[in-house]
Image (tube, coloured by chain):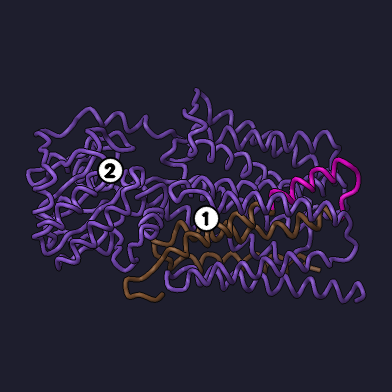
Amino acid sequence: MGSLGAGTLVQASYFIAAALFILGLKRMSSPVTARGGIVWAGVGMVVATLITFLTPGMENYGLMTVAIAIGGILAWVTGRRVAMTDMPQMIALYNGMGGGAAGAIAAVELFAGEAHGAAVLTLGVLGGIIGAVSFSGSLIAFGKLQGLIKRSIRFRGQNFVNVAVLAVTLAAGSAIVVQSGGSVEIVTVLFVLALLLGVTMTLPIGGADMPVVISLYNALTGLAVAFEGFVLDNAAMIIAGTVVGSAGTLLTQLMAKAMNRSLANVLFSGFGESAAAGAATGPGGALKAIDTADVAVMLGFSEKVIVVPGYGMAVAQAQHKVWELCQALIARGVAVKFAIHPVAGRMPGHMNVLLAEAGVPYDLIYDEGEINAEFETADVALVIGANDVVNPSARTDKSSPIYGMPILNADKAKNVIVIKRGQGTGFSGVENALFYLDHARMLYGDGQAKAAELVQAVKTL
Amino acid sequence: MIDGFIALYIFMLAAFTGYEVIARVPVILHTPLMSGSNFVHGIVLVGAMVAMGRAEGTLELVIAFVGVVLAAGNAVGGYAVTERMLEMFKSSKGKR
């Protein structure tokens, strides 16, 4: 095949890949077709990658294959093994790798000093900066969620430092564009500063906000890929990168909204500081404990039970036992539904994944908007490892740091049972008024153990 | 080949497409979808391959090599975790 033919084949494969990515993402937007969606996108990726080997004028095939094998095998093994609870940080890690790759493309092009117009060069430099920020930032996010970085590091004037680093980075980038390409030194400075920026931007952000940040970096990586696509004249990268950039931006906004925070608030202020202020005024009254046998009777003779799982349930690995309990209840004719708050788990939809892993069918799972009106007709709201998302203070107490956050109205159910390890507070550090209500009872203990006891107790009713 | 305004049009249309595709997605799928879109930008792999194919000299080659490793990790890892998550979504009505 001549070089023209091979070039056309490569373009055709990119066209097919771009179409498959969009169709795949579209299919992923419904639980019924989602599985097929990722397979479609996967086919697009394989086709594009294989045909790229035919690109005219390329060298280094041997090393290229080795590089693909190293990255691919490492990622495949880790991706298959990671626990579902650790999914957010793995996404952060893989996303960071994509950002790093975009940065690497920019670096190679800049070091090579390929002749580009000012507009393309600008995009190349911007893509490189964004990719590098996404790379180092995602690695910090990974480190935090994985527990490798324990503390949120903050110091006075942090935002000022970030702005200063950003300004110098942009100045270095501008210099490269003005000179139509930079020396090795200035290009190196550009990337070192961009990597530093990702670190200083991410370090102060608390673990609870990390999902929003990961989503933002996901969108940024998409944008960086699109920009480098312009540099390489690669339509597949432009289209796929831009689609992810805008989809990721929307997803980031949805997440921030679900947490009742603005994106600026997440990025520029540490959580915890504002939260501590409201914590002083705890609700009055006493916590009323209950034992397993009583809960089993209450659940077993209910008509309708709404389960409200939180991340605490996942930490206790209780989802399988909870589903077993629900199956026992369903067998007794009790109507069981799951109510999921948008930010339950580590990020929106994470709880759905964890429940799906335990075998809970997705049509028993309802989100906050769908089910909130139903709590009034429920005999029992069973709250397992959830805290802030069921705190009625969010509706009533203007001084509460979580005031205004949409919550699940578990307090409206006729009875509320809370399975909880101890008397601590949630992520926000706020006391939960729900636990002090007259019709609320606390079942203290490990979620998994308590759920297992409940299964036995319900079965022997 | 992709010049000036044509490039801008592609950018604009792709941006709207991404927005529209995600806009009607239920919260239950946000995590898998973020993971899925994370996989899609793994297409950076083809760019990294092209950059490596053209690389000359040790410095460029080393950076390009790292780029290809990272890009392959993005694509393969993104696929592995997304597929695992979506595999688990089942309906109580039996077959999906």
- Which of the 4 image quarters holds residue A189? top right
Q: Is residue A114 left or right of residue A415?
A: right
Whether residue A124 is in magenta: the answer is no
- Seen from this angle, which residue lies furthest top? A156
Residue A240 shows up from this direction: yes
Chain shown in brown: B
Labels in figure, total? 2
Chain shown in purple: A
Which residue corresponds to the image point at 35% horizontal and 75% vertical from the top-left?
A: B94
Instruction: Count residues near mark 1 (Cα–Cα under 10 Å), then give few for <14, some for 14-19, many for 20+.
Output: many
Using the image, determine if residue A365 lies above or below residue A153: below
What residue range appears in magenta?
A: B54-71
- The amino acid sitting under disc 2 is Asp
- Which of the 4 image quarters holds residue A306? bottom left
Q: Nearer the viewer, residue B9 or A81?
A: A81
Residue A245 shows up from this direction: no
Asked which secondary structure carries label 2, the reply is: helix
Instruction: Count residues near mark 2 (Cα–Cα under 10 Å), then give few for <14, some for 14-19, many for 20+.
Output: many
Chain holding disc 1: A
Give the residue at mark 1: A249
